[in-house]
Image (cartoon, helix red, strand yellow):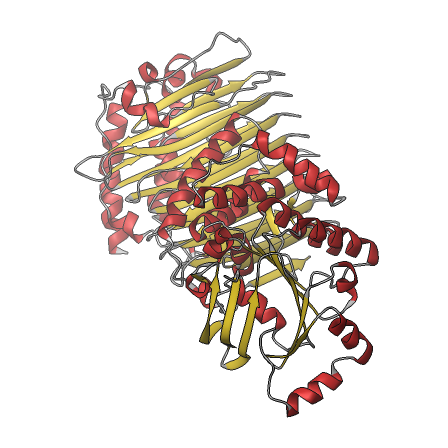
Amino acid sequence: MTTAIQYVGTYLERFTEFQSRTRVEHLPWLHRLREDAFARFCATGFPTTHDEDWRFTNVAAIARTQFVLPPIGAVQISGADLQPWRMEEAAVELVFIDGQFAPELSMLDNARRSTFVSGLEETLVKHPEQLEPHLGRYLGIRRDPFSALNTAFAADGAFVHVGRGAILEKPIHLLFVSRAYAVPTMIHPRNLLLFEEESQATVIEEYVSLGSSTMLCNSATELIAGDSATASHYMIEREHTEAFNISTLRIQQHRSANVASHSLLLGGGLVRNNVHPVLAGEGGECLINGLFIGDGGQHLDNYMYVEHASPHCSSRQFYNGILDGRAHGVFHGRIVVHKAAQKTDAKQTNRNLLLSDDAQIDTKPQLEIYADDVKCTHGATIGQIDPDALFYLQSRGIDEMSARRILLLAFSGECLERMKPGPARDHAERLIRGHLLSVASRSPGQNDVSHGEPVTERSWEEVG
Amino acid sequence: MSLLEIRNLHVAIGGGEILKGIDLRVNPGEVHSIMGPNGSGKSTLAQVLSRREAYKVTEGEVRFNGKDLLAMKPEEAACEGVFMAFQYPVEIPGIGNTYFLRSALNAIRKYHGDDEVDAIDFLPMFREKLRFLEMDEKLMNRSVNEGFSGGEKKRNEILQMAVLEPKLAILDETDSGLDIDALRVVAKGVNAMRSPDRAMLVVTHYQRLLNHIVPDFVHVLVDGRIVRSGGPNLALELEEKGYGWIEGEARQAVPVSGY
């Protein structure tokens, strides 16, 4: 493949440049990790739609764009620029500009001994021994070329260590801000979130843009939940629509660990959100909850790969999608139940609302079950705003636009209800409300509903 | 001036004509009952008056309070004072019953330039109405009509009516599917709403409801036309003889219109 060879050459140049400017030296294990990952990426190249996992998402535009690394050095951003994105209720707020940790813009509170939060690169410099046992151990570079690419270029991101038995009431906010440049840029944020035994905390990863230009944000997060730990993770994508955003959350759950992953895809042009939990210890529970709202030409792909590797674990996937304009949504939920994972209870539900004729959703369940005593169910629905419900609201005096917004909020509310009440959920709710206000007002009343045409709803449900 | 004035109303849906020239005048304070066999166009009339857009008006006019009702959107009609209690109230998961009702009340208040009612002021008046309709307060914390029994749904409609205080209340087959206890509660709620400023249009197939909500006028709708109008006794006559005789008569006679 000539094109593949072309871009591999470009990435080789970038990789050489990246290695020459890294602040972290004398860590042979890290060097090897990156080299192996880069070799892996070169061997596979970017995925194509012939690849089953990428059937509905074409990343050719990423492959043919020549991305450069953003300039390194002093960050020319003031605190005021960030004000709209800040989360006041956060216990800790780490700000990353173009993927680089910006301590002067962050709000750190490491007074508590039980929890340590810092930039990944800084930790690699100061305490590499804390990272070596975990970094890159869980994220599979063989499964996904983007994960390989991230690992090759992994320099900075967040390191969160929640100590044994520590309980954080307020969330940790990781704010990734990308700036606009004259040439396409790429960043590869890499986070390591370590939850020790019986700890409990919430981490919010949020991606936003200052200005608008072509860029690739290819992030990867490893989340390790120790025995009986309770971890909540939020992925919030709010970048501008020229952004390519690929994110991967790899969760490793130990015995009786309880992990909730909430994804909120509101922004971005081409977005792929991978969530890959491995239920490695008995009695684990995993909730994968998501909401994606797209319009214009947005492409929002939600890919889940849930691995049940131990007995008596349960997983729940609930994704709701709202698509308007020419937006294209994808829900790909793969559940693998390994032979040892008896008494697995796995459930998957994907519900979608299509608000325009040109909006599209591809929803695909994939079950691979090797154990013989399991319960796996999956179902999906595709529909429109219920005209009866719309009329009911209008007949009580609520104008059509508000009625549509109320119904969209209700549909989104299903996802909000699955979040634990608290600042993180409030934050998510604010963002959803604000976003739906613009979606509802952009969908005028001339859709099918007012002509009384029958609603088309397709659904399927299977129990296996 | 009549509150509602319907003149020669023709309505079609999907190519077929359902209403074939309805004339009806309703004054404030009056309760009119529209009776008729299945498929006669009763519910269509109710839907058109509440401005369901699926129904196409091909001829005629409707004035409400002197204004052209057919030019209004459903929310405008509601804000002007038209309320329909649905035959099949819609379940709306994810929207709290209280939130819904307060949003509706405030939408109407805003339309009239009144201040919005906040949650604190809203609750007391709301609780009182709940008690009157013998409704469990827990229903208010649930989503609109979701998982409600048939009786609870109908009572919820009457509750909405009581809160929104319309000028014209249309009850579309409110009695269908109700046991006698629920029917009594619903009728009690409706009767409490009767006032010299408010008119009601009670659409029903059976006379049963009219034992509890006694109308001033009864109109019999057959095949899209009002074929007979009279006092409350007409309902009793229908109950006794069924619709057959009047349908037979209707085929021969020239339609009687108005009241």
Q: Position of residue A330 (x, y in %)?
A: 46, 53
- Which is more toward the observer, A226 or A230? A230
Q: Is residue A89 above or below residue A282?
A: above
- Which is more toward the observer, B42 or A193? B42
B175 displayed left or right of A158: right
In the rendered image, which quarter is residue A126 located in?
A: top left
Residue at 74% of width from left, 55% of height from top?
B187
Residue at 76% of width from left, 76% of height from top?
B238
Outermost residue toward the front?
A: B1
Outermost residue toward the left?
A: A182
Q: Is residue A302 above or below residue B237?
A: above
Q: Is residue A455 visible?
A: no
In the rendered image, which quarter is residue B102 located in?
A: top right
Q: Position of residue A131 (x, y in %)?
A: 46, 21
Q: Is residue B67 visible?
A: yes
Residue at 69% of width from left, 41% of height from top?
B129
Q: Position of residue B42 (x, y in %)?
A: 62, 72
- Which is more toward the observer, A205 or A324? A324
Q: Is residue B214 above or below residue B45?
A: above
